[in-house]
Amino acid sequence: QKEVEQNSGPLSVPEGAIASLNCTYSDRVSQSFFWYRQYSGKSPELIMSIYSNGDKEDGRFTAQLNKASQYVSLLIRDSQPSDSATYLCAVTRGSNYKLTFGKGTLLTVNP
Amino acid sequence: EAGVVQSPRYKIIEKKQPVAFWCNPISGHNTLYWYRQNLGQGPELLIRYENEEAVDDSQLPKDRFSAERLKGVDSTLKIQPAELGDSAVYLCASRPTQANTEAFFGQGTRLTVV
């Protein structure tokens, strides 16, 4: 079982819809959870971090964490074509700050 | 505040040649990561430093890859000799060594081995 798993997609949504991106992780001692956005040919850019169970909202983005289910998700409301990118889920394991990434989910928002 | 700086941005070399990448992290960030990212894949950790100490290098192919962070600030990653399969983007990231902090990436170095 991989440490961090994501559906590779592609996930296609119409403009204005909600995009839902999912991530599971295998290590129960994982403590910090991140979503990065990566445009083609660019480096990953942090968009959300979440450290405790529940929801965290920032503008059109909401991260959801469920440690019991070892599940973290990212919701993008009112999706825009500019949101089209690969979304990477990343997890740190315990207190040693090892940052492990999933393969990423390619999101396409259609005008 | 300056971000993570990497150089060069692009490098094309012939196989069996050596190559080196340089990274200057964000000031005050004690944790430094080197990742390799292949097309369509997520970043894969090569090595992680806490200050000048390499604390996680289990994924670093030590027969040809080496890294150093002598003064606990900037870092270099070297490949010698390069192979065709080393073609990838090499990413450097840094973060403060504190709980609940984020890592920030440099622009990466795209390596092409021909």
Image: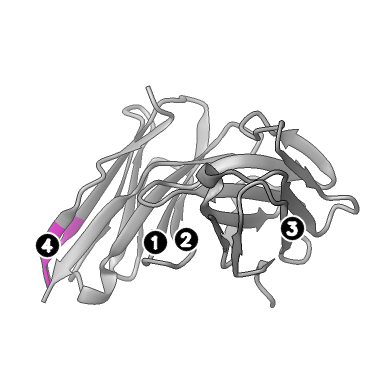
Name the quadrant containing residue A69. Answer: top left
Residue B11, relative to residue A30: is it above or below? Answer: below
Instruction: Give the structural element (helix, strand or loop) at label 2.
Output: loop
Residue under label 1: A37
Is B29 on the left or on the right of B46, as rendered? right
In this rendering, which labeled residue sits more in front, label 1 or label 3?
1
Look at the image and tell me whether residue B103 can be seen: no
Look at the image and tell me whether residue B3 can be seen: yes
How far across and down, in percent of the image, does residue A33 sit?
Answer: 46, 45
Residue under label 2: A44
- Name the kind of residue labelled 3 in the image: His
Residue under label 3: B29
Q: Quadrant of the C terminus of chain A?
A: bottom left
Instruction: Give the structural element (helix, strand or loop) at label 3.
Output: loop
Q: Given the image, what chain letter belongs to the residue carrying mark 1?
A: A
- Between the residue at mark 1 and the residue at mark 4, the CA separation in whole angstroms equals 17 Å
